[in-house]
Image (cartoon, rainbow, N blue to C red):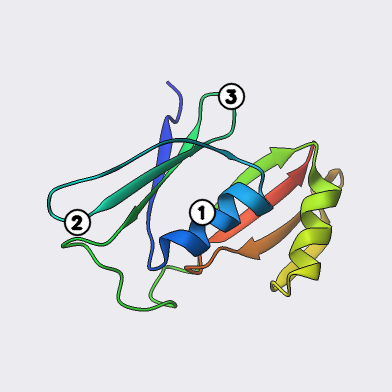
Amino acid sequence: MKISWITLRVRDLDASKKFYGELLGMEQSRAFETPDGRQFTFFTDGQGMEVELICGGPCKVKEKGLRNPMVSFGFQTEAYESILAAAQKGGLDVNGPLVLGGHMECFFVEDPDGFQVQVIKA
């Protein structure tokens, strides 16, 4: 069994696309809109896992900060240093860099909707 995708309901699709596409370097794999106004955009890590962003329609997200602060997910990348620099330069709230477990270098950053994203050095 493998994780195919993680679904995130977002407030601002353009801000989320910028975060996952430009900052994390994921590639948009597909997008569509349903008759009820929901917009779906998928970003791939290039290795079979995707992040699905859903915006609008009957499942609107009311405001940032309503998320469970313990919800997070991690991406391991060889572009670690450039993502860290871009996040810091972009004024994002970066926690780290840290070394966890004595060997894993990483940092945490929130996406535009407050989801914790852990970026791990490959």
Q: Quadrant of the C terminus?
A: top right
Disc 1 residue type (three-letter): Lys
Which residue: 51% across, 69% down? Answer: 114
Residues at badges 1 and 2 in contact (C-beta under 8 Å)?
no
Disc 3 residue type (three-letter): Gln
Mark 1 and mark 3: span between their CA atoms?
19 Å
Residue where numbered disc 2 is placed = 37
Q: Quadrant of residue 64?
A: bottom left
From the viewer's side, name the closer residue of 55 and 99.
Answer: 55
Q: Is residue 13 visible?
A: yes
**Image disc number at residue 47:** 3
- Mark 3 element type: loop
Mark 2 and mark 3: span between their CA atoms?
30 Å
Mark 1 and mark 2: span between their CA atoms?
18 Å
| Of the image marks 1 and 2, the number of the one nearer the N terminus | 1
Say whether residue 38 is left or right of residue 19: left
> 79 above or below 118?
above
Which residue: 65% across, 51% down? Answer: 22
Mark 3 Cα-neighbour bin, 10 Å: few <14, some 14–19, many ≥20: few
Q: Quadrant of residue 30?
A: top left
**Image disc number at residue 17:** 1
Q: Is residue 71 visible?
A: no
- Mark 1 or 3: in front is 1
Which residue: 13% across, 49% down? Answer: 35
